[in-house]
Image (cartoon, rainbow, N blue to C red):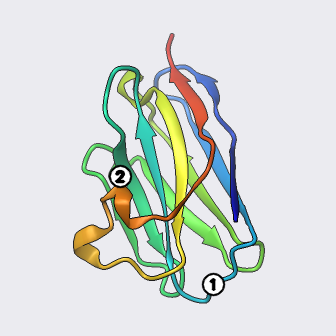
Amino acid sequence: VQLQASGGGMVQPGGSLGLSCATSGLAFSSGTMAWFRQAPGQEREFVSAIMWASGHTYYADSVKGRFTISRDKVKNMVFLQMDSLIPEDTAVYYCAASSRKVILSAVRAGGSYAYWGQGTLVTVSS
């Protein structure tokens, strides 16, 4: 199983960036995919998650209203559209996957996801 994240880069505050995560070797009709991020010197934190079957989405309070997670069930890909970016969004962003549906109380926990991508760096700076 491999997850390949892409789309990171540098953007000015207020700008937008879109991340993609391609999966291979992971075929599931139900399950959960998520994005986490880790800023320098800080712990990894939950950003967003999506239930593969239903499309239900979940967001950290810090990104709600600015970020949008989506998935392509045909291509087995998940996306994170990031708008109104602020310097505090600077981090390495990781996509993660669980082949099983993660219960709501655990969707924000990194330990709920068995598969992780390599990360892509997002820098928000003027």
* Image location of residue 114, percent across then percent down: 50, 64
4 w.r.t. 40: above or below: below
What residue appears at the point 43 percent right and 48 percent down from the top-left corner?
Answer: 36
Q: Secondary structure at mark 1?
A: loop
Quarter in which the N terminus is drawn: bottom right
What residue appears at the point 32 percent right and 52 percent down from the top-left corner?
Answer: 64
Amino acid at pointer 2? Gly
Q: Is residue 18 left or right of residue 32?
A: right
Determine the image quadrant of residue 21. bottom right
The answer to whether mark 1 and mark 2 are in CB contact below 8 A is no
What residue appears at the point 47 percent right and 22 percent down from the top-left corner?
Answer: 13
Mark 1–mark 2 distance (CA, rounded to whole Å): 29 Å
Amino acid at pointer 1? Phe
Disc number placed over residue 77 in the picture, else none: none
Q: Secondary structure at mark 2?
A: loop
Q: Residues within 10 Å of mark 2 (few under 14, many from 20)?
A: few
Disc number placed over residue 28 in the picture, else none: 1
Determine the image quadrant of residue 73. bottom right
39 w.r.t. 45: above or below: above
What residue appears at the point 31 percent right and 34 percent down from the top-left corner?
Answer: 43
Q: Which residue is mark 2?
A: 65
* Image location of residue 22, percent across then percent down: 72, 59
* Image location of residue 94, percent across then percent down: 53, 46
Query: Which tag, 1 or 2, sits closer to the chain's start?
Result: 1
